[in-house]
Image (cartoon, rainbow, N blue to C red):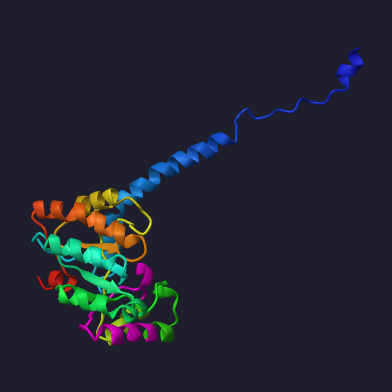
Amino acid sequence: MGGENDQRGPREVRSSRSPIVPLAVFLLLLLGLVPCLYWLSPLLFRVWASRSPEVVFRVETDERVVALTIDDGPDPATTPGILGVLERHGARATFFLIGSRAERHPELVRAIVARGHEIGNHMWRDVPSLALDSATFERRLLGTHRVLSRFAEPRWLRPGSGRFGARMVRRAEAHGYRIALGTVYPFDTTVRWPGLVARFVVGWTRPGSVIILHDGAGRGARTAEALRHALPELRRRGYRVTTLSALVGW
């Protein structure tokens, strides 16, 4: 009887902690971190700006004037709606246009300029500019310039996906461009709630801010809706919303 017990080996000790517990902790931390990074991102952009003085992120001023910039147009389904909202609220913007889209829709580029807005160069296609070799970058920059210069003389470049390097800055300057990004970017390419985008823009706008929003596909409709909420509140707070060149020259 006792021999049976003697043949048993040491008991296996199993952890009572479920693998679900660390996963749950990780998800809770992630869910807390993402909103924090979202709402604090303008501070991170300001740190980036301090390290890149050759690029315009914002303008130092005490005046309540800001630049509104809108990327990725023109789009016949959404650009007219954005133009209508801007006109109703007396706001001006710099539209960073993609060359291939501007070539297909010259009537929209003409309408943007005719309503007192500014056009900027957002390269030929919607791809990360930093991934392009020097020759391709220059060819697409100049191809877009040739299209846009039929309507106005663009002076601002916003590289695709907003990333840049020193060589890109030099090539842009050689062709009369200065790179411009911004500090108030509500990640509206991902965030699909116009009300949240509007609250972000209003909450983080400061004198001299450069605001980044997007046109095209479903984004343009969300931008128009966000601006319907944000522009009246910015005006109530005493802000003038204008073009990038107007802000820089203020």
Q: In this view, does 207 lie to the left or right of 137?
A: left
x 62%, y 27%: residue: 16
Question: Residue at 33% of width from left, 75% of height from top?
Answer: 98
Would you place residue 247 above or below residue 232 in this image?
below
Numbered circles on residues, count: 0
The residue drawn where x is 30% and y is 82% is: 172
Give the camera-side residue of 122 and 113: 113
Q: Does the magenta stretch include residue 152?
A: yes
Which image quadrant is residue 7 in? top right
Q: Position of residue 132 (x, y in %)?
A: 44, 78
On the image, which quarter does residue 216 sit in? Answer: bottom left
Q: In which quarter of the image is the C terminus?
A: bottom left
Q: Can residue 49 be found in the magenta stretch?
A: no
Vertical placement of 46 versus 23: above or below?
below
Q: Quick one: which residue is furthest to the top in this view?
A: 1
Q: Nearer the viewer, residue 212 or 105?
A: 105
Q: Which of 16 and 198 is in front in this view?
A: 198
For the N terminus, the image quarter is: top right
Examine the rendering and report whether any part of residue 77 can be seen.
Answer: yes
Report x, y in % for residue 192. 35, 52
Q: Which of 226 and 208 is in front in this view?
A: 226
Q: Picture coordinates of residue 230 (x, y %)? A: 19, 53
The image shows residue 240, relative to residue 172, as above or below, that is above
- What span is colored magenta in the figure? 139-165
Residue 237 visible in the snapshot? no
> Residue 231: x, y in percent?
16, 56
